[in-house]
Amino acid sequence: MPSAETESLSTATGVDTEVLRAMLRTGLSLQAAGDDAGLRDFTLPGSRYCPACLADTGGRWMLWWRLRWAFACPTHRCLLADDCPQCKRQQRTRAIPIEAVPVPGRCALPGGVGRSSPRCGADLSAAKTPRLPKAHPALEAQQAILAVVAAGCAAEGVYREAPVTAAQYLRDLTALGMRALRYASAADLQAVGIGRTNRDPLRAVVESSAADRLHSAVPSPPTAAQTAVAACAAIPVLAADSVPAAGEHLRWLITSSRAQGLAVSPTNMTWAHGTSDTLTSVQLAALTPHLGHALQVRLRCHSPRPRPAPQCVPPVHRSLPALFWYRWAVPVADTPVGFEHLRLGLSAAVALAAGHRQLDQACRSLDTISTGKRASRVLQALAARPDWPDTAVMLGAMADLLAEHPAPIDYERRRNLSTGTLLPESLWHRICRDIGFTPGSGLRIRFIRCWLYERITGSPARLCAEAVNTSAFRAVVADMPRVLYPEMVIALDDAARQFLDDNGLGDEPLRWSPPAHALPGWMSRNPVDTALDIAALHTLVQPRDCRLGAVSERLSVPIELVREVLNDQPAPRPVQTAAQRRAAGAVTADARKRLTREYFAELYLNQQLSLKTIGAMVGVSRQTVGRLARVYDISLRPPSVGRPPGAQR
C-alpha cells in the first residue's frame, strides 16, 4: 500500500502507521526487489487458515497464513485449511465489496453471481483439519520457516557462513521442496521419514505420489498437505550443519531422479529462478558421487563449499610447473602410476581446478606432451585412494593460492626459453676443471643440460632441445642424480643462475616451491620419504656401479623418490684412488684451491721458484703445477739448458 494511503487509513482508524504496515502483506518483509512483484513470489493469491485459531480469537486472521509456505499451525498442531468447508473455495482471493459487511470467522465469498449475491457464510472454525503428532517433522519445519521470516534472514544451518535474506531462503526452499514434491516417489519420501506410519496425516499425500504423474498432479499452489511434504523434504537439507552434510541429506533425491532416467548434472541443476550460491554448493555436493573425477576437481566437490567453475580463468598455469613440485607430490607418491606421470597429472588437475573446462585444455596450458587421457588416468588412480577427498581439496586450494598469490617464477616464460646458451661447452669444461670432474664426450654435456633444463623449468627433461628421443638416453638422464655430488650441483646451479640472468629473469629465484604453511593440512601428513635414511642412501649410491633401482629396493621406497632426494641432497664424492683422482682432474682442482693465480705468480714469477719446488709445497707433481700454469695463462720459463748456474725453471 502506498504511504499516502497508509497515512489516510491511520487517520481514519486511529491506528499507528507502523502497526498498519505490520498488518499488511508488506509486514512479512519478504520483498525481493522492493516491489509487490517480489512479494507475490512468496505469498498465496488467497490465504490458508487454522480453524482452531479462528475459534480462539473470534475470527482474527493471521498474516503469515498468506505465505506460500504456511501449512501447519504450531499452536494447535494441525494442518491449515486450504478452503471453505462448505463452498470449497480458497479464502481471501479478492477484496470484499464495500457494501458487503464481513462476519469474522465466516466465509465471505458470494454464494451466487453478482456483487449483491448473499455470502456463503460458512463457519470456518468448524472446518476439519488433520492433527499432527507433537514432534511431527511438519511442525518443526513450519517453526523453522516462521523463525526465518520473523528474523528477516537465515543465518543458521548451511547459511551459517553466508547468511541470506528471508526471501532468498524461501526461494531455496521452493527449489528443493517443489523438486522433491514433483519427482520423489512414495518409497523415496517414506525412506526419509515422511508419511512412514499409518497414523501420519501426510501418508495419504505421500502414497499418491506416483513419480510418473507427480509433475502434472501438483496444483499451483500446492495444498497445505503437499506443501508440508515438500517442507519436510527440504528443511533437513537447509538445516544441516555444513554444505557437505546438506549434500548427504539431498543425495537421495539426486539418486532417485537419475534412477527414473532424469538427467541431473551440474549444467541443469537450476531448479528455480534466483537460488543462492549456497544451494548450488549443496546441489553439487549431493551430485558428487555421480560425477567423474575431473569434474569433482573442477567443481571443488570435496571442498567445504563446492562451486561452479569461473567464467574467467585466472592465469594459474603461469605459476605452475609442468611437473608438480616434488615435495607436494610426495604425500601421494605411492599411487600406482609413474612418479613423473603423477606430477604431470597433479599440475594439470590444479589448472583444471582453476577453471579450465577440460583436462586436455589444462595440459595444453602447461605446454606438456601429456594428454587429458593420461591426466585422467592419474586422477582415477588418486580417486582409488582413501584420501582422495583430501587430495581433491588440496588441488582446489592450490589453484586458489596461486590465483591470489602468483608464484615468483613465471613457468610459462621459462618453458619458452631457448636453451641454446644453457651451459656452454667452455663453461662446462671450466666447471669440470675446477671441481675435478671428467668432462667426458660431447654426449655427457647433453645429459647434464637436460637435467639442468628440468631443474629450472619444471618441465620433463625429455622436452629439452638437447634430448634424444631414445629410451637409452632417457635412462641415462634419469640416472644423473646418482653421479652428481654437492660441488657439481652448486656449480651447475651457478651456471643456471647466469643463464636466467642473461635471459632477463634476474628477478626470479632459481627454484621455488609453495611454502609448507600455505596448506598445512596437506604438508603435515606423513610423507613417504620420512623414513628414508639419507646417510644410508648416500652410502648405497657412492659405488660407481650402483643402480638406483637396486637402491630403491634396498630402501623399500619408489625409485622416483630416490632420484628426487638425490637432486636436493646429492651424495658426497666417494673416496678415490690416486689414479682415479688424476684421471678425473681432482688433483689439479685441489692444487688450484691451494694455489690461487696471485699466489702462484708470486712464487713462480717474483720468487723464481721452480715448478718442482712449488709442487712440493702443495703436495703435487711438477707436471700438475705445469698444467695449473697453463690454466692460469702464465708462461713457463724455457728449459734450463744453457742457463746460468743457480737459475730455476
Image (spheres, grey):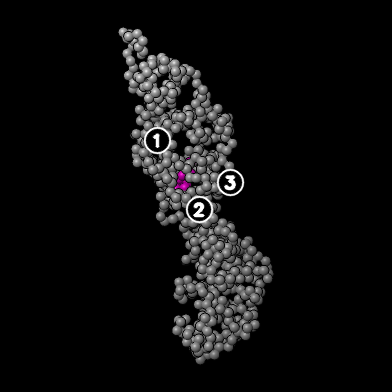
Q: Is mark 3 on a helix, strand or loop?
A: loop
Residue 291, above or below 63: above
For marks 1 and 2, give the CA distance: 38 Å
Q: Tell me which segment is drawn in magenta.
A: 343-352
- Residue 407 percent across, percent down from the top left: 43, 46
Report the number of numbered marks: 3
**Residue 227 seen in the figure:** no
Q: Residue at x 36, y 23 (%)?
A: 632
Residue 300 is labelled as 2
Residue under label 3? 386
Q: Earlier in the sequence, mark 3 or mark 2?
A: 2
Q: Which residue is drawn at 39% across and 29% down?
A: 446
Residue 436 sits in quarter: top left
Label of residue 496 in the image:
1
Provide residue 408's location: percent of width, then percent of height.
42, 45
Residue 385: x %, y % from top left: 57, 44
